[in-house]
Image (spheres, grey):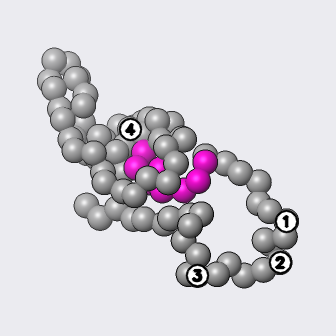
Amino acid sequence: MASIDGVFVRRPATPVRVVDPVGAGDAFVAGWLAASMGGADAAEALDRAADAGALACTVESDWRRPDPAALHHAPDPSDTDHTVHDHVDR
């Protein structure tokens, strides 16, 4: 939701499978700022912010150091327990 110059705008949340919500707020603000500074109206800026915040929830943590042992082994594509890669279609 946003209220800009007395005009209230509401957009739906972007649905994703949440792995970890850490970083979602920062991503939301970054999406809002990028869209607003690029000339988007409030509805489009909210959509982009919601998408960014939602996508941040689809991976574990907002940062992590790679396991050095994992760098030498190809990941098993059937292993989806640790990271979920979702996408947003608007």
Dot 4: what SS? helix
Q: Left or right of 35: which side holds 25?
A: right
Residue occupied by mark 2? 72
**Residue found at the very far front of the displayed protein:** 81
Dot 2: what SS? helix
How far is the residue under mark 2 from the one under mark 3? 15 Å
Residue occupied by mark 1? 68
Q: Residues within 10 Å of mark 1 (few under 14, many from 20)?
A: few
Q: Are marks 2 and 3 in contact (CB under 8 Å)?
A: no
Residue occupied by mark 3? 77
Q: Left or right of 87: which side holds 26?
A: right
Residue range (magenta):
53-61
Q: Position of residue 70 (x, y in %)?
A: 78, 71
The quarter of the picture where the N terminus appears is top left
Q: Are marks 1 and 2 in contact (CB under 8 Å)?
A: yes
- The residue located at (22%, 23%) in the rendering is 3
- The residue located at (18%, 35%) in the rendering is 10
Residue occupied by mark 4? 32
